[in-house]
Image (cartoon, rainbow, N blue to C red):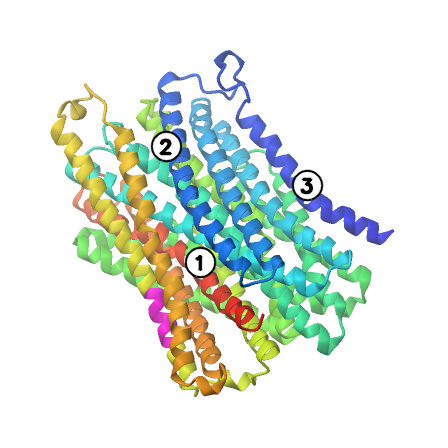
Amino acid sequence: MFITIYYACFGLSFILPLVHAYYYYSQIVNIEVDDLRKLSANGVQNQSMREIGNAIKDAAQAYLKKQYTYVALVSVISAALMYFIFNIYVVSGFIIGSFLSGLCGVIGMHIAVMSNMRTAQEAKKGLSDAFNIALKAGKATGFVVGGISMMCVAACFFMIVKGMNVQYVLDLLLGLSFGASVVSVFARLGGGIFTKAADVGADLVGKIEKNIPEDDPRNPAVIADNVGDNVGDCAGTSADLFETYIVGFMAVLCIMKSMINSMNDAFMFNYPFIIAMICSLGCYIAILSVNRMGRSPLSSLASILIRSALFSLVMNFAFLHHVMNFNAAAMISIPFSMGIFVTFALVLITNYYTSSDYNPVHKIARSSKSGHAMNIITGLSISMESCFGVIASIVVAMLVSYSALGLQGIGISVISMLGMITSIVTLDAYGPITDNAGGIAEMSGQDPEVRERTDELDAIGNTTKALTKGYAVGSTALAAIIILYTYIQDTYEFTLLSKNIFRLDNVFVMSGLLIGGALTYWYSSFSMNSVAVVGESVVDEVRNQFDNDPKIMTGESKPDYARTVSMLTEKSIKSMFAPIAVVFGGTIFFFLICLLIEPSARFANAFAGMGGLITGVTLVGILLAISMTTGGGAWDNAKKYIEDGNYGGKGSDSHKAAVTGDTVGDPYKDTSGPALNPMIKMVNIIAILIIKFIFR
C-alpha cells in the first residue's frame, strides 16, 4: 500500500508541475496567435507594442537557434568520441542531459518572450494585472525546469526499484551531468556575452553620448538589449539551475552509495530521492497557493519561497516520523533544515547587498558624487565584503550537517537546497519578463503611468534576479564540495590509492590548488574581455547608424535593429569558445603534466594534482562568483537609486558616474559571475570522467 503511494507521489512530483506549466502557458499565449480576432483578453492589441514584442521574440529565437546549432554540433562530436571511451550508460546520459538542458533553456526563453508584451499590455490596466501575468510566466518556467529535473530523478528511482545495477544508474547520472554542464556553460557564457555587450553598447552611446533615455527606440541596440535579457537570464539561468540540480544529485548519490558498504543502510541511499520528491511537491503546492499580488509584488514573491520551505520541512518530518522514531527523525531533519537555512541566508544576504533599501547600495550611490573612480572603488569594496556572509552561512550549514550525520548530512543539505529549484526559477523568470515589459512600454510610447508600473515591477525583478544568482552560487558551492568528496572516493575505489595522497604537504596537491585558482581567473578574464570586445563592436555599430542617418535622432527614420542583432549574435557566439577551451584544455593539460613528471608513481601524483586543481577551482571560483554577482547587482541598483531622484537624479554628474559603475558591473553580474557556476562543476566532472576513462 505505502509502496504504491510512494510510486504515485514520484509520478505526481513531475507530472503535476509539467501539466500546470502548460496550463499557465496557454493562459498567457493563445494558440491562435495569427488570428487577432481570437486573441484572449490578455492579447496584444496595440500595433506598435506588438511589433516591438515580435521583433524581440524573432531575434531571441534566431540567436538561440544559431547558438544551439553550435552546441548540438559539439554535443554530437563529444558523444561520438565518448562512445569509444565510456560505457553506453555514460554516453546515453550525456545525450539526454545535453538535450534536456537545452530544452530547459529554449522553453524558458520562449515563455519569457511570449510574456513580455502581455505584461506590458496588462500594465495599461493596472499594477496587479501586469504582475499577475508576469507571475504566471514565472510559474510556467519554474514548473518546466523543476518538472524536468524531477523527471530525471524519478526515472533513476524507478530504474533502481526495477532492479537495475546501481552503478549503471550512477554512470547514467554522470553522463547526464556532463551533458547538462556542456550545454549550460555555452548557454550561460554565450547568452551573458550577448546580453552585456548589447547593454554596454546601448548605454555608452545612448545614455552617455547622446543623452537619451534607456530603452529609447532611437537607439539601434535597444532590441538587442532586450533580446539579451531573455537569452541570458531566462535561457541561461534555466539551463544552469537544471545542471546544478542534476550534478548535485549525482554527487550525493555517489556519497550515499560509498557509505552503504560500511553502514549497511539502504535507507540513506534512497532518502535523497524522497527529499527531491517532497521538495518538488512542496514547491508545487506553495506556488499554486499564490495566485495574485498581495500587499506588494515583493511580498507575494517572497511568500512563494517561504511557503515552499515550510511545506517541505513539514512534509519531510512527517515522512521521517512515519518510518522511524521521533529522535531519529529529528536528527535526520537537522541537515535537511540546513539546506533550507542556506537558501534563506543567501537570499537575505544577497538582498542586503543589492537592494536599494539598504546601506551598501546607498554607499555606492553616495560615492558617485565624488566621481567615476570613487564609484568603482566603493563598488569593488562592497563586492569583496559580500563574500564573507555567504561563505559563513555555507560553512555553518556544512558543520552542523556534518556533526549530525557526517558526509551524508552534507549530502542531505545539498539535496534539500536544490529542492527549492522550482520556486527559485519562478522568482528568477519574473525578473527579465518585467524588465522587457518596461522596455516595450517605453519603445511603444505608452503613457507615463504604464512605464511607472513596469518600472515598479522591474525594480522587484532586479532583486529577484540577484537573489537567484546568489542561490545559484551557493548551491554550486555545496554541490562542488560534495563532488570533491566523490572524486576522492572514486580515486580510492578505482585506483586503491591511499586518501593520504591528498595531503596539503603533497607538492602536486599544492600545485593543483594554485593552477585551479589561476584557471578560474583566466576563464573569467576571457569572458570579461569577450564582453569588452563585442561591446566595442556594438558601440561602433550604434555610432555609425547615428552618424550615417541623423534623422534617427529626430525620429523621422527608424534604426536598423536587425543589423545590430545579427552582428551581435555572430560575434558573441564566436567569443564563447575561447573561455570554454581554457577549461577543457587547462584541466587535461595539467593532468598530463603531473602524469609525465613521475610516471613511476602509477598515477598517484596525477590524481593528487587533479584533486588540488578541482579544490582550487571550487574555492576561488565560489568567492569570485559571489563577488561578481553581488557587486554587479549593487552597482546596478545604485544607478537606479540615483535615477529615483537621490544624489542629483538623472543627468547629474553622480548619475554619469553611476552609469559607469553599472557598465563595469554588468559583465560582472550577468556574464563572468554566473558563467563560473557551470565552469566549476564542469572541471569537477572532467576529473571524475578521467578516472572512469583510465580505469574503465
Q: Residue at x 75, y 66 (%)?
A: 267
Quadrant location of residue 451? top left
Residue 394 can be seen in this image: yes
How far from the left and from the top, in percent, is residue 169?
Answer: 66, 60
- Sooner in the amino-acid sequence: mark 2 or mark 3: 3
Q: Which residue is mark 2?
A: 59
Residue 388's place in the image compared with 344, above or below, is below
**Part of the protein shown in magenta:** 513-521
Quadrant location of residue 568? top left
What amino acid is found at the position of numbered circle 3 in the picture?
Ile
Secondary structure beneath label 1: helix
| Left or right of residue 150, residue 102 in this image | left
**What secondary structure predominates along the stretch shown in magenta?**
helix
Q: Which residue is mark 3?
A: 15
What amino acid is found at the position of numbered circle 1 in the picture?
Asn
Q: Give the CA separation, mark 2 to mark 3.
A: 32 Å
